[in-house]
């Protein structure tokens, strides 16, 4: 096995600079990731946040997840003119300028997706040359500066024309025609680097140039950059130059062989100042070199084939930094290298091997002694010390063959306790790290206290000096007093289980964990009480790895299978945190609490930081390779707290040291944009056949869709390149969904099908890799027009139509009923007419006959009269029926009118006065056919009776209404009659009573001889 | 003023009734039968040829209705008195026929003696009316919206008589009540009829009629 001896230095993290070491974690983007070519020449970031890269074979747009290529399409005049892109520049409006190797200049409009072309033509009115080397957008003056191999050009955006500068022998002309770089500073000065013409400064009137030649380390400036202090940094092939234009002082940096903090090489291709003020230079053959102005030192990052996340190429073309802080290095043959300068720094101390021993295969305990020495116990190897300052590893105790070290724990003061299966030892490191031999002594042997027991765990009692608590594999807890060499045995209930860990709380309580449960020591009863019964919970019946108490006196337990258990205050109901709460697993080993109350656990995904609020797990942040961890296998190690608040975790590859307080969340709140709109899975672009989009979907505020365009999806992306794969997204379609839907970065699409017409708002927001959400998000309004059959107009007109229909039906029915009535009336009238006429003729004939025979056969006169009478009374009856049938006669009033005629004929002849007393309300009452017939006939019969038999003088008919009853009284002041003699009037009274019953009423007759007669007809209406 | 012989024409579509009426008229010495017709289609010529004093007119006849026939008669032969005959006493047609110019009406079921009296009355210029008809006339006057000149308004007495008729008084009782003779009552009723005829010729009234009777 190769012995890789890396001695790592580390600096204490301070506020203004990063700790430097060679293990900067670079993420590589090559053709494997979709980049179109490994030779990347230029980098810009547009106004929305996307990154654009120019390569030798095409332009690429990067959204954090994938590269979208733009290539030359010979069939499309509006495509990129050449795939060989040399430089890029972006305007605030989002328009991108692309310089190509030899085909001129393109201007890309991201909203129309079209490339405009500007080329050199022989008329000299355009570009001076088609070999574009550099671009710079001066947004204040609305000029685009274009450097070519043959002259400097300016494109005036207002006038839309080119002007140019060429080198000439005249003074104040530009130093050379071969332009390499153009930059503008905050003061509006435009600096131009050239080949062989040095540095040039354009005058304010854009007519003359001030040239800096012969002072610089080389007259060929490859790249320049203006720093925050307005110094001009120039990368040349012969060193780095820094010019202060105010003082006109120049400083040159060269590579110095003996100075390892100097430039690694003089052959520089690019220079850039990052957000923290460090100056990055890209070298042609040696990678990246970064200058720390405050330290006045250069540090180099170069390719290391053994380190997988180092630079993958030493040939740097250019460097740039995105707005979120992501740092990009474009190389000649390695594509893009990106690193996050805020990448959390983990120092892995790979400890050197001593001979062939595999120190870290089975570490069973670590602790820090005398603040500088790490004591490591390896089960089969022995005990080592590792000097944290100088990195020296020393073995201090050897393990005899067949034996093993069982556990290690700190004792009183600077003593350290360790044991094998049977014997407990104590050791103490010499002061001052002297090279004295380490002394250790045996304290006690277990087989003398508890035969057949093995030591599995122990701790030193913090409250009482010199007391050690020892746990055995048969669930016995021994309290051993070092001073008096006395012991007390406390037995656990379950002798099958072995004690895996012992913890002493602040209040002195002793808790033990076994591989089958959790117990607490009750010293008064002398027993280890199983807490499963106390808490009435089975969660403890698992292998307990570790128990700790946090600053708030809560107990935290790591288990195999039940996740992490919290017992609030040590006595409340246990709360389990498992996969369901967001943890990546249910088996946990070591757990430690940091100063801010977070908990750190090692797992096989890396180091986990758990943040709880009240009883809820609000963040489980896993630090892995991308965060800079060189390895992720921490599930079987040990951990302890070191000096200065650092944590140490062991793993097979070494000991990881980090400061938990420095690992803060990425605060960058990523903006999110909607990148695509798909209708029924077909992408919609502005200007296509659907006509939905006028400009690109990212800037569209509202979408108008028809009712059958109601299945669509949105694709979105957050512009946060730092570990974009861990970004989370949430979206909601207001009007359709009530809750936010959460998705991770692999699934950046929201689909909706068959939406009802209406107005919706789609909002999406994103969080960065550390779960920091940008709650602002972005929204687009969607208006789905209702098809005409769902608009309110349609509903109203349907309703109106229905009403009209129902009215029409009603009207027709009514008409039919009326028609039927008409027909009925007509039939009865025709019948009446015919029969009536014929009966009348009988009456007349009988009269004629009477007159003819009145002298000859006077006895026949009454017969003739009778004949005529019969005929006439038939007509009468028929007339009554026809009258009753006629619906025109439905009012009570009509009955009275008809009765009056009868009364006039019958009563008047007998000189009986008739009076009617009917109130208007009754007169207007409407009656059914049966009612009218019956009432009329009853009253008619009554009147006839009065006329025939009463011999009265006055007769009155009165009607009153009482509730729902009508009461009609017929009174005469005649002679009355005996009621018993029902035969009086023949069937008349019986008929009347029958008719009253048919009316649902009653007919009462009150009569007394000589006191008149009263008939009362009462019926319900 | 009794004429010596009253000449009567009969228009009736029911054969039995027509023949019995004819027989009745013939039997009575006061009357002379002109002719009996089953329909009024040629009433103009027939009346012109025979010039009766009184025409007994059935209301419901095929072809030309009794009401239209009355109009023709009144237009051409104003002195001829027309008595309407009907089985129904609640027929609006009766009222319209009076407005058209009939002087009275008889129910077919009336006793023949009453019929004979009615003819005699009509011939003398009377106007036999029954209460239901009277009430209808009253309603007409009440309901008119158009101001009419005094000529055609009913006088107080006439209104009184009409009202009494509506309330069921017979001519005899009205005469007693108003302290006038029965003949005076009849005279008033005739005037009421006259006024109706004037009404019926006015456009406004025919409109009101139409509104009411249709």
Image: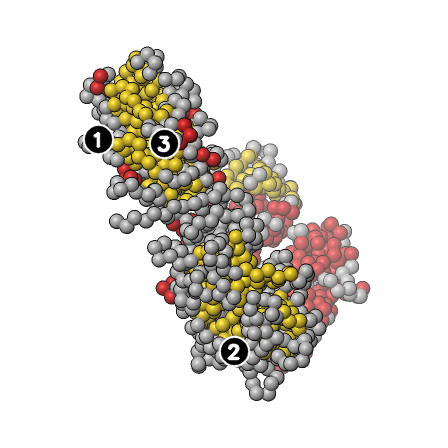
Determine if marks 1 and 3 fall on one subunit: yes
Viewer-side label of 1, 3: 3
Cα separation between marks 2 and 3? 69 Å
Cα separation between marks 1 and 2? 76 Å
Total marks in image: 3
Determine if marks 1 and 2 fall on one subunit: yes
Q: Kindly identify which chain the residue marked by label 2 belongs to.
A: A
* Label 3: element kind: loop
Q: Kindly identify which chain the residue marked by label 1 belongs to.
A: A
Horizontally, is A597 left or right of A524 in the view? right
Q: Which residue is painted at 34% across and 24% down in the image?
A: A459
Horizontally, is A159 left or right of A746 in the view? right
Q: Which residue is painted at 34% across and 38% down in the image?
A: A393
The image quadrant of residue B40 is bottom right
For the question of whether residue A426 can be seen, the reply is yes
Q: Indicate the position of residue A785 as horizontal and vertical percent values.
A: 51, 64
Q: Which of marks 1 and 3 is nearer the N terminus?
A: 1
| Residue labelled with disc 3 | A435
Residue A131 - label = 2
Residue A400 - label = 1
């Amino acid at each position: 096995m190769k012995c890789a001896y890396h001695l790592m230095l580390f600096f204490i993290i301070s506020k203004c600079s990063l700790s430097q070491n060679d293990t900067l974690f670079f993420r590589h983007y090559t053709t494997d990731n979709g980049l179109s070519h490994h030779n990347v020449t230029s980098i810009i970031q547009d106004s929305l946040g996307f990154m654009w890269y120019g390569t030798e074979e095409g332009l690429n747009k990067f959204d954090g997840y994938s590269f979208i290529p733009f290539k030359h399409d010979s069939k499309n005049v509006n495509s990129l003119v050449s795939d060989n892109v040399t430089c890029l520049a972006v305007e605030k409006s989002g328009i991108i300028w692309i310089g190509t190797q030899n085909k001129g200049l393109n201007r890309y409009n991201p909203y129309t997706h079209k490339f405009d072309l500007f080329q050199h033509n022989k008329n000299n009115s355009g570009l001076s040359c088609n070999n574009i080397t550099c671009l710079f957008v001066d947004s204040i003056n609305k000029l685009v500066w274009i450097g070519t191999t043959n002259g400097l050009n300016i494109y005036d955006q207002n006038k839309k024309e080119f002007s140019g500068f060429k080198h000439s022998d005249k003074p104040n002309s530009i130093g050379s025609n071969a332009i390499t770089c153009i930059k503008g500073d905050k003061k509006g000065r435009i600096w131009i680097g050239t080949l062989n013409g040095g540095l040039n400064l354009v005058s304010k009137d854009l007519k003359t140039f001030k040239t800096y030649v012969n002072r610089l380390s080389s007259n060929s400036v490859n790249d320049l950059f203006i720093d925050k202090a307005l110094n001009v940094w120039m990368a040349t092939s012969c060193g780095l130059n820094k010019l202060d234009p105010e003082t006109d002082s120049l400083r040159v940096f060269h590579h110095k062989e003996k100075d390892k903090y100097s430039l690694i090489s003089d052959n520089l291709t690019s220079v850039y100042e990052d957000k923290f003020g460090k100056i990055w230079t890209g070298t042609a053959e040696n990678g990246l070199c970064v200058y720390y102005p405050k330290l006045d030192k250069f540090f180099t990052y170069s390719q290391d084939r053994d380190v997988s996340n180092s630079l993958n190429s030493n040939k740097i073309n250019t460097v740039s930094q995105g707005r979120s802080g992501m740092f990009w290095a474009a190389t000649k043959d390695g594509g893009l290298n990106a690193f996050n300068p805020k990448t959390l720094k983990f120092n892995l101390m790979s400890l050197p091997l001593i001979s062939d021993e595999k120190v870290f295969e089975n570490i069973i305990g670590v602790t820090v002694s005398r603040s500088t020495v790490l004591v490591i116990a390896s089960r089969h190897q022995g005990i080592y010390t590792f000097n944290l300052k100088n990195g020296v590893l020393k073995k201090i105790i050897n393990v005899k063959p067949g034996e093993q070290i069982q556990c290690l724990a700190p004792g009183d003061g600077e003593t350290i306790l360790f044991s094998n299966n049977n014997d407990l030892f104590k050791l103490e490191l010499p002061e001052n790290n002297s090279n004295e031999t380490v002394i250790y002594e045996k304290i006690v042997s277990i087989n003398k206290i508890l035969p057949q027991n093995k030591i599995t765990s122990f701790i030193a009692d913090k409250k009482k000096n010199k007391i050690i608590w020892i746990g055995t594999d048969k669930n016995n807890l021994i309290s051993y007093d070092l001073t008096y060499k006395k012991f007390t045995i406390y037995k656990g209930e379950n002798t099958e289980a072995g004690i895996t860990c012992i913890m002493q709380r602040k209040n002195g309580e002793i808790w033990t964990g076994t591989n089958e449960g959790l117990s607490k020591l009750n010293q008064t009863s002398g027993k280890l009480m199983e807490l499963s019964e106390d808490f009435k919970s089975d969660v403890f019946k698992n292998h307990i790895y570790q128990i700790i108490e946090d600053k708030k006196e809560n107990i935290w337990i790591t288990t195999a299978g039940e996740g992490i258990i919290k017992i609030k205050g040590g006595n409340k109901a246990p709360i389990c945190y498992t996969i369901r709460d967001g943890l990546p697993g249910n088996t946990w080993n070591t757990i430690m609490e940091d100063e801010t109350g977070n908990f750190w656990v090692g797992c096989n995904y890396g180091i986990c930081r758990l943040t709880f609020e009240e009883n809820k797990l609000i963040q489980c942040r896993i630090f892995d390779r991308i965060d800079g961890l060189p390895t992720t296998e921490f599930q079987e190690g040990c951990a302890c707290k070191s000096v200065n608040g650092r944590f140490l975790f062991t793993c097979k590859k070494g000991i990881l040291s980090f400061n938990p307080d420095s690992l803060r969340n990425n605060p960058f709140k990523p903006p999110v944009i909607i990148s695509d709109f798909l209708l029924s899975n077909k992408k919609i672009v502005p200007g296509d056949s659907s006509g939905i989009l006028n400009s690109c979907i990212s800037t569209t505020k509202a979408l108008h869709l028809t009712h059958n365009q109601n299945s669509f999806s949105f694709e979105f992306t957050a512009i946060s390149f730092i570990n974009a794969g861990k970004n989370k997204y949430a979206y909601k379609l207001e009007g359709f969904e009530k809750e936010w839907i959460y998705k991770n970065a692999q699934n950046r699409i929201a689909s909706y099908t068959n939406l009802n017409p209406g107005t919706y708002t789609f909002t999406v927001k994103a969080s960065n890799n550390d779960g920091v959400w940008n709650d602002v998000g972005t929204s687009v309004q969607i208006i789905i027009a209702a098809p005409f059959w769902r608009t309110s107009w349609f509903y109203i007109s349907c309703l109106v139509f229905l009403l009209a229909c129902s009215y029409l039906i009603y009207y027709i029915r009514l008409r039919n009923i009326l028609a039927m009535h008409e027909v009925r009336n007509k039939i009865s009238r025709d019948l009446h007419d015919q029969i009536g006429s014929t009966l009348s003729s009988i009456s007349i004939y009988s009269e004629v006959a009477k007159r003819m025979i009145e002298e000859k056969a006077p006895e026949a006169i009454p017969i003739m009269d009778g004949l005529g009478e019969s005929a006439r009374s038939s007509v009468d009856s028929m007339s009554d029926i026809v009258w009753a049938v006629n619906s025109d006669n439905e009012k009570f009033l009509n009955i009275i009118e008809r009765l009056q005629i009868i009364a006039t004929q019958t009563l008047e002849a007998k000189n009986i006065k008739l009076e009617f007393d009917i109130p208007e309300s009754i007169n207007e009452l409407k009656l059914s056919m049966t009612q009218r017939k019956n009432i009329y006939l009853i009253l008619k019969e009554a009147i006839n009776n009065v006329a025939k038999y009463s011999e009265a003088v006055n007769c009155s008919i009165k009607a009153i209404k009482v509730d729902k009853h009508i009461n009609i009284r017929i009174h005469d002041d005649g002679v009355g009659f005996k009621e018993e003699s029902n035969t009086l009037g023949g069937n008349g009274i019986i008929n009347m009573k029958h008719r009253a019953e048919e009316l649902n009423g009653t007919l009462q007759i009150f009569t007394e001889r000589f006191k008149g007669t009263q008939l009362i007809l009462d019926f319900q209406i | 003023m009794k004429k010596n012989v009253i000449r009567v024409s009969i228009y009736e579509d029911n054969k039995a009734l027509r023949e019995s009426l004819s027989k009745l008229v013939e039997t009575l010495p006061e009357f002379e039968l002109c002719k009996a017709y089953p329909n009024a289609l040629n009433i103009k010529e027939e009346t012109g040829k025979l010039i009766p004093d009184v025409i007994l007119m059935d209301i419901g006849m095929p072809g030309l209705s009794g009401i239209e026939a009355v109009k023709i008669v009144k237009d051409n032969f104003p002195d001829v008195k027309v008595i309407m005959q009907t089985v129904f006493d609640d027929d609006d047609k009766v009222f319209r026929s009076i407005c058209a110019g009939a002087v009275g009406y008889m129910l077919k079921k009336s006793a023949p003696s009453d019929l004979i009296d009615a003819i005699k009355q009509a011939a003398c210029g009377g106007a036999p009316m029954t209460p239901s008809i009277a009430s209808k006339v009253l309603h007409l006057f009440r309901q008119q919206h158009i101001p009419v000149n005094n000529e055609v308004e009913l006088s107080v007495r006439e209104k009184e008589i009409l009202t009494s008729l509506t309330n069921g008084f017979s001519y005899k009782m009205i005469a007693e009540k108003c302290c006038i003779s029965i003949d005076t009552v009849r005279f008033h009723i005739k005037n009421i009829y006259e006024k109706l005829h004037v009404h019926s010729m006015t456009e406004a009234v025919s409109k009101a009629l139409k509104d009411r009777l249709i």
